[in-house]
């Protein structure tokens, strides 16, 4: 019998010093450090690829997290801070077409399983890639890909804030998620949606929610 070992893990790496800055949380000037959080998916811990990359900064005085500078998302320093083994592990299997096909199939299966788990256990800060057209009675367009972010979780209900823009192609919101734009407060308008926890799973099954970023 043949078994496939696959999974994922989150990791954090230090990028480097961010200079002297003012922290809004502790109201002190202190030396900040640039960091990057990312998720690595794997098969047999040999085939690896990074699926999410979120740079940020931390205050050296109180440890508060702050948004990264605009140029940090795709800077060579941010990318280079991620372990080379995590970034390039996929290349080990590049010579095997059959292995690549299996990797893609397993990755899709893992993504679906991970999404279902994260939908069932929502956390503040989760971002849902959403086809907003499926959530309104009279949508502006047949397809409206945007984002919803979890801002509050109770025992029975989840409060979501809705993005103030949408795309007719999922690649638009996926790009925004990769670049960290969906972590910015200005990405969302004033519309909030309160959804029973039980309804989130149905929204995912119906295709209203298509992906989860945690």
Image (tube, helix red, strand yellow):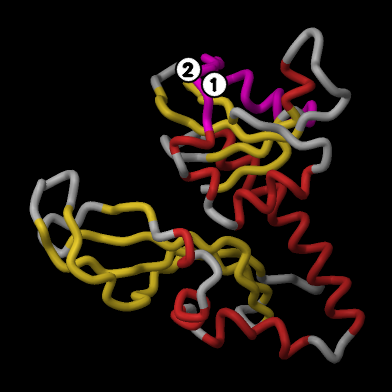
Q: Earlier in the sequence, mark 1 or mark 2?
A: 2
- Which residue does the image show at 72% across and 47% down from the upper left? 112
Callout 1 secondary element: helix
Callout 2 secondary element: strand
Question: For this view, does 4 lie left or right of residue 26?
Answer: right
Reply above or below: 197 against 106: above
Q: Judge by depth and name the residue closer to the eye, 23 or 125.
A: 23
Question: For this view, does 24 lie left or right of residue 154?
Answer: left
- Which residue does the image show at 60% across and 70% down from the upper left? 50
Reply above or below: 183 against 56: above
Query: What span is colored magenta in the figure?
Result: 188-207
List x then y, in percent, for residue 171: 77, 49
- Contact, mark 1 vs mark 2 (Cβ under 8 Å): yes
Label 1 – label 2 distance at C-alpha? 5 Å
Residue under pointer 1: 197
Task: Say the numbered circle drawn on residue 33.
Answer: none
Reply above or below: 66 against 81: above
Residue found at the far right of this picture: 97
Residue under pointer 2: 157
Choose top left, top right, bottom left or bottom right for residue 145.
Answer: top right
């Amino acid at each position: 019998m043949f078994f496939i070992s696959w999974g994922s893990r989150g990791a954090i790496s230090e990028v480097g010093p961010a200079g002297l800055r003012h922290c809004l949380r502790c109201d002190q000037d202190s030396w900040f450090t640039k960091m990057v959080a990312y998720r690595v998916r794997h098969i047999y811990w040999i085939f690896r690829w990074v699926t999410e990359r979120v740079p940020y900064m931390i205050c050296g005085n109180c440890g508060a997290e702050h948004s990264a500078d605009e140029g940090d998302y795709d800077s060579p320093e941010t990318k280079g801070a991620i372990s080379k083994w995590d970034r390039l592990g996929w290349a080990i299997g590049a010579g095997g077409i059959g292995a690549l096909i299996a990797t893609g199939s397993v990755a899709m299966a893992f993504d679906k399983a991970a999404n279902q788990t994260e939908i069932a256990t929502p956390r503040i800060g989760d971002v849902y890639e959403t086809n907003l057209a499926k959530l309104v009675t009279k949508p502006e367009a047949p397809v409206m890909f945007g984002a919803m972010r979890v801002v509050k979780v109770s025992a029975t209900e989840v409060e979501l804030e809705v993005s103030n823009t949408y795309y007719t192609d999922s690649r638009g919101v996926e790009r925004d998620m990769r670049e960290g734009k969906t972590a910015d407060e200005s990405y969302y308008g004033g519309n909030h949606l309160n959804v029973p926890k039980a309804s989130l799973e149905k929204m995912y099954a119906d295709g209203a929610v298509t992906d989860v970023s945690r």
